[in-house]
Amino acid sequence: MKITGLRTLRTHRDWGRPVGDVNGFISSGITEVPVVLIDTDEGLTGVGLGSDQSVDALFPAIEGEDPRAVSSLYDRMLAQVFKSGHAGATYGGIGTIDSALWDLKAKIAGEPLWRLLGGRDRFVPGYASGLDIALDDEQLAAFYASMAERGFSSGKLKGGRDWEADVRRLGIVRDALSAASSRPALMLDANESWNLKQAVRYISLVEERVDLTWIEEPLRRWDAAGHARLTRSVRAGVATGENLSGLEQYTPFFEAGAVDVVQAGAIWGVTHFLRLALAAHSRDLPISPVGLTANPGIAHAATAVPNHLSAEVQDFGTPFGITVDEHYADGGIVLGDEPGSGVTVDEAAISAAPDDTSDGGWLVAEGPHVRSSRAGLRLVADDRGAAG
């Protein structure tokens, strides 16, 4: 079997609520979803969701190759962009192609990906995450109550600007999830909005009132030294890594003892997740994938590693024109038996649909992918004063 072509589609996801974090949010709740399709000379097509960045430049590395050689093709893609580098957005394209190749490999074998990778149990433990910075208290309670109805007993709040509000809202999350557990696990995600001393003060204040399981992305993604100092200064575990694009970027964190929960962005693909999980396991650290709604294949990979902790579940829906062979129950994801990663694409429906992301999706000016110029440089928590 040979790889003969690469095609891309764009569909959308309607979250049914505003989504975002301390850096901004998308009020429409409608976001763009790139789809990458890898065709073969025997009629099978692999599906990858996540990013289509640089895929045309990457395709020569896999064209004409046998799609079953996934790990080797992953390294060929890294080599293809050697001079310009694979970090950043290009790594997303590598990850999506990689996920499509793993989908193909499992389809060729006639097995679900979780089984092909060596998973024994189709169940993937998860935690609830509402991307909830723009939800009012009533909406926040409703979202986490809906997650508790599916058995989720852990939740992650977006925050980082007002510790008193975060304490109140963590209480709302706790109360909602108490339907599933008498002692829900609570996490707080600051999305790189603090400097070190801000983080220590802020987390210490929150911890006086809330038992935090972990604090996520408290500092800039590359600050291994800062994360190491922070984890020794607070009780909560420090979780980070979702925005590190490449295994080599984790090395300073491992060497500094700077991370307690190793996170992997689902968008970076299956091979990245598998390699990172083993690197973390060699250091007795758990791994937790972020954003499985962006790449369902990572849930399959999570079944096959020895140190998977819990996976971020942000929603029960799927993008328009996409179906996924999985369901949510008992506080996690229950994977199906369809060969591959279980993702089916209705290309005709997607092609015929109007563009529902005219507001720019994730990249709107006020959206969560645009960092504030004053992040980490405020003396007070809010922006009402010009000197803040």
Image (cartoon, rainbow, N blue to C red):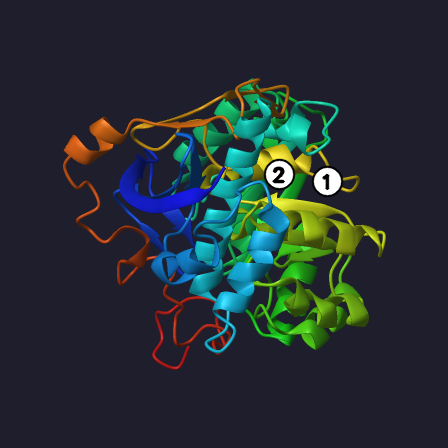
Q: Position of 320 compared to 316: left or right?
A: left
Tag 2: residue type? Ala
Binning the other alpha carbons within 10 Å of mark 2 as few (below 14), some (14 to 19) or many (20 upward) gives many
Q: Position of 243 compared to 351: left or right?
A: right
Q: Position of residue 217 (x, y in %)?
A: 59, 60
Q: Tell me what residue is drawn at x 69 percent, y 54 percent.
A: 276
Whether the residues at callouts 1 and 2 have beta carbons within 8 Å, the answer is yes
**Res 210 visible:** no
User: Residue 171 versus residue 298: which sits nearer the camera?
Assistant: 298
* Quadrant location, the C terminus: bottom left
Q: Work out how far the residue at label 1 is from the one at label 2, CA to CA, in angstroms.
A: 8 Å
Tag 1: residue type? His
Q: Which quadrant of the view contains residue 42?
A: top left
Q: Tell me what residue is drawn at x 36 percent, y 53 percent.
A: 52
**Res 162 visible:** yes
Query: Tag on residue 51?
Result: none
Q: Position of residue 49 (x, y in %)?
A: 42, 42
Q: Position of 224 compared to 370: left or right?
A: right
User: Residue 349 versus residue 285: which sits nearer the camera?
Assistant: 349
Q: In the rendered picture of this protein, how many numbered marks are placed on residues?
A: 2
Q: Tell me what residue is drawn at x 49 percent, y 60 percent.
A: 91
Q: Position of residue 36 (x, y in %)?
A: 37, 44
Q: Which residue is mark 2?
A: 311
Helix, strand, or loop for circle 1? loop
User: Residue 194 versus residue 5: which sits nearer the camera?
Assistant: 5
Q: Residue furthest toward the bottom? A: 387
Q: Tell me what residue is drawn at x 72 percent, y 29 percent.
A: 119
Query: Tag on residue 308?
Result: 1
